[in-house]
Image (cartoon, rainbow, N blue to C red):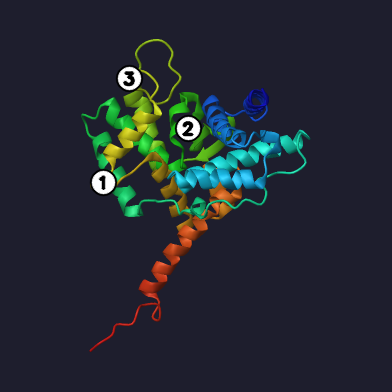
Amino acid sequence: MQAAGQTSGNVQMVREYGVYLRVEKGLRPASCESYQRDLEQFAEHVEGRDGLLVGATQADVSGFMEGLRGHGVESRSIARKLSCLRGFYRWLLMDKRIQHDPTVNVETPASWKILPKSLAEGEVGEMLERTGVAARAADADGLALRDHAILELLYAGGLRVGEICALRVEDLHLDMARAQVRGKGDKERIVPLGRSAVEALERYLAMGRPGLVRGGVQRALFLSVRGNPLTRQWVWEMVRSAAPLGNKVSPHKLRHSCATHMVEHGADLRSVQTLLGHADIATTQVYTHVALGRLKQVHREHHPRGKRRVVTS
């Protein structure tokens, strides 16, 4: 009976936290479900010692992470689950249900700081040039214009794939070279667009999208051949197929490429944070390491004392 009571208590607490995330934090349903799954997994771990979530200790959290690692779960996924637990216990502290946060001294897995992978500028240029040629052809159809516009927008604004799918026609303000984007937690931000992206979007709106509309009012910016809003999976597949030969490219890699190339060209982190819609500057700071790697390479190649010595026999 005690174990059943503990289980029901944990279930109720996870449910309440889900309501908090949805109502107070304004997170999307998919994000709320993901957080709840992670919490339910931790609750099962705590219940293994007949415990409750409110009574969890640092040893419980560390043991949970070790168990995940032992089952081959990637460090990045473990770090995400730890981030979920930290948010949950901050909520309990704020609600005065606990007096101590069991996650406070738990270290995040080192690979949480894995440097994001990005394409070289030449690789992005090759990708956009190829789709641009197809979009500018005299016989270009709506799909070629749409695909090129999506790629230009992904790279120009560092958008997430979900943000691309959620864009509406009225979100574009091409006369001011910008777009209004709804990111995580339905937070809105203004994303400036360069000339290439603006031109690609103008051509798509004028000559591509009208041919994809299939009657009625469709507010989504990017449409399928059947006139429906594009899915995330479809955008992933399109980006993958447009990649240069031998390269694995995803929408997220284009987002990283946008940020990396901006930092390499001297952009400050606060500007990049605003562009990408990062809630915490710490998330953006990883690009300083990326830029430092590039700086080291340039130093080795161009500084008179930066090159490795060539040993002659």
Q: Label 1 to label 3, Cα distance in Å?
A: 27 Å
**Can you say whether 291 is above or below 157 in the image?**
below
Front in this rendered view, residue 177 or 71: 71
- Dot placed on the residue nearer the N-terminal end, 1 or 3: 3
Q: Amino acid at mark 1?
A: Pro
Question: Which residue extends farthest bottom?
Answer: 313
Residue tagged by mark 3? Answer: 212
Q: Amino acid at mark 2?
A: Glu
Quadrant of the drawing holding the C terminus: bottom left
Query: Can residue 175 be seen in the rendering of this structure?
Result: yes
**Other residues around mark 2 within 10 Å, as few (<14) / some (14–19) / many (≥20):** some
Front in this rendered view, residue 22 or 142: 22
Where's residue 125, x and y in %?
A: 32, 49
**Closer to us: mark 2 or mark 3?**
2
Q: Quadrant of residue 250?
A: top left
Mark 1 residue element: loop
**Closer to us: mark 1 or mark 3?**
1
**In the drawing, does residue 47 fall left or right of residue 276?**
right
Q: Amino acid at mark 3?
A: Leu
**Can you say whether 187 is above or below 64 in the image?**
above
Q: Point out which mark residue 163 bears.
A: 2
Q: Point out which mark residue 28 bears.
A: none
Where's residue 308, x and y in %?
A: 35, 78
Mark 3 residue element: loop
Where's residue 12, x and y in %?
A: 66, 23
Residue tagged by mark 1? Answer: 244
